[in-house]
Image (cartoon, rainbow, N blue to C red):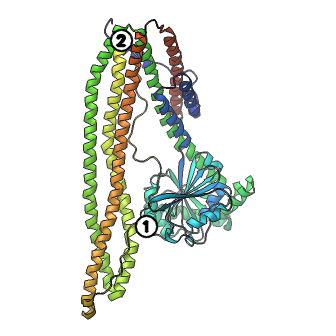
Amino acid sequence: MSGGPMANQESVRRKVNSKKPAPSPPNPSLLPELLDNAVALLQSQRPDAIQLPGLNDLRDQLLEERLHLAVLGQFKRGKSTLLNAILGEALLPSSVLPVTALPTWVRPGEKRVKITIENNHEAVTEEQSTGDLTSFLNRFVNETQNPENILNVTEIKVFHPSEILKKGVVLIDTPGIGSIFRHNTAATMNFLSQCDAALFITSADPPLTEAEVEFLKSVRDQVPRLFFILNKTDYLDKDELEQAISFLKETVRIKTGIDPEPVFPVSSKRGLAARTHQDSDEWEKSGMADLEARIFKFLAVEKQVALREALSRRALDIVNNLLMELNLSLKSLELPLTDLEKRITLFEEKLGQTRVERLAVLDRLAGEEKRALKKVKEEAEQLKQKAMKDIEQIVEETAKGTVGREWEQATRKELADFIPVYFEDRLGHFSRRFRKRMAATLEPLQRETDHLIESVRHHAADIFQVPFYAPESESAFVALQKPYWITHKWKQSLSPIPPGTLDKVLGAGLQQKRARKRVLEQVEELVRNNVENLRWSIFQSIQTSFRRFSNRMDGTFDATLLATKGAMEAAVRKHKEEGKDRSDEIQHIRKLSENIRILSERLSGSLEIKKTESNSR
């Protein structure tokens, strides 16, 4: 072992780092092809490679990742008609009555409607793919057929083969503004921050309302990208249209602080007719073509480019880890057995300290989880006290203008309206605050975990004198992957309070005092139940996040150890097979290693192109 196992490692690293990408690197859009090539290569030549599931996952992410586009609009602004125009047929109900407080998810696929209903704490699915799908939908989304969601619908999915959906868009029709449920505005805002963008639909008749202005003020910091659409332009002449656009821009800019540029003037009614009759000229004239093109541009430039770069870096890391494993296998097969066993012993010694550090990270992780859960409990108690004060104030205000049974009825009505809005809003604040805390807590642990995992590869590369490839991607804790909508059944009703025998002989003032005491006792129970609902929701989220982090850490560490140590141990077994010629195995690994190296260079090349394109934009 001349010069020791770590000799000349710096020169090896310099050689790897100075290696140029392939002379003709591919366009970034070839990432799907490169992933397909990598998967096919491993399936045919190394089907047991631990990197194969990771490459398959990246390929699935590339196929499944979509632009989640929420659609917002006040009642009777033409939201459903616009969505139907995008789909190319009148599928979603356009009702004169408000719909339930749930979003409708419109996804790519064969045309069908899927409804999920909660029945005795179990999810029951109703699905229809033929017949009148609009009428089927109406049974669940229309307030006349499903008043206040008495059917307990929890999810509404519409699948459709529309081109815009096939190209990576998921449309989310939110109840939004004008819903009969006041707390739904808060629920919508909590949901919007998870979407990639939103379409805000308004019209000139009537002009932008105060309710819409207030809604925009509320959501301006929640939506990453907001597109403004002026609908029903077919009712306006040229001058009226210019005035309407100018008024909308000025009002939005002054009253909400949002820059609405550009505003897309459309006639969704005209666009739907154009799509139905496949009239491309009318589609252009309706304004829908410009809107569709802008959505595609956002998808291609702002969403998918970032996604593909991230996936390319992760794919390159996986491919380079495989390349190092192959080089390790090759070196282990070429070394004399005694030399190989000495290096394995040295590698095990290095791993001892890494394992100790791994346990320390796990201990810190457990401690951080306990602290986070304790903090939730403390803040829930603070919220309970504040909620009691806020609700007591409403009770007192109501008492000023009413007396007797009239006061009790007014109080019940006020609280029924107030409580869902109050707690839905607190849930949003709670969730965002703890999401930030989780990121601040777990990101340092993520960096430490990455360092531990890379140290395993470093030790192997140093001891066996094979190239080490520094990771291209950065691991990051992500608390949420896809938008989701939570249906909370906030407890809001006060039971009517029957007067007791004593009340009948007391004066009106004393009767109201006793009634007030009983109301506040019920209020205390309502607050306790709702705070517990909120606390449990955050509690579960935190536990899931820590569990997922721990599982991912263990899985990645074990997989890395298996790949490195496994290559060494496999070589030892080959050495000990008497009379076995290792030359065929060596030749096979060299050939596979060369193919993987070419893939690595092509992925590196695609990243260089992405950097160039990003700089030129």
Answer with left or right where residue 549 lies relative to residue 108. left
Q: What's the mark number on residue 340?
A: 2
Foreground: 515 or 458? 515
Q: Amino acid at mark 1?
A: His
* Residue at figure coordinates x 65%, y 53% from the top left: 111
Q: Is residue 429 above or below residue 467?
A: below
The location of residue 599, given as percent across then percent down, is 53, 24
Q: Is residue 185 left or right of residue 4?
A: right
Q: Nearer the viewer, mark 2 or mark 1?
A: 2
Which corner quadrant of the image does residue 575 belong to?
top left
Q: Secondary structure at mark 1?
A: helix
In three-dimensional space, the C-alpha distance between marks 2 and 1, rounded to whole angstroms, equals 68 Å
Observer able to see residue 6: no
Asked whether residue 2 appears in the rendered view, the answer is yes
Q: Amino acid at mark 2?
A: Leu
- List x then y, in percent, for residue 139: 59, 67
Task: Give the mark nearest the N terminus, 2 or 1.
Answer: 1
Instruction: Determine the residue positioned at 74% across, 54% down.
Output: 278
The quadrant of the rendering that contains the N terminus is: top left
Q: Is residue 368 above or below residue 491?
A: above
Report the number of discs. 2
Residue 172, by quadrant, is bottom right
Crowd around label 2: few <14 · some 14–19 · many ≥20 (10 Å) = many
Query: Is 379 or 302 nearer to us in this picture?
Result: 379
**Percent position (x, y) of residue 195?**
48, 52
- SS at mark 2 in the image: helix
Residue bearing mark 1? 183
User: Which residue ends up furthest to the front in the rendered image?
Assistant: 578
- Front-lying residue, 615 or 578: 578
Tell me, for residue 97, which label it has, or none.
Answer: none
Of 239 and 63, the residue lying toward us: 63
Question: On the picture, is 230 further left or further right than 49?
Answer: right
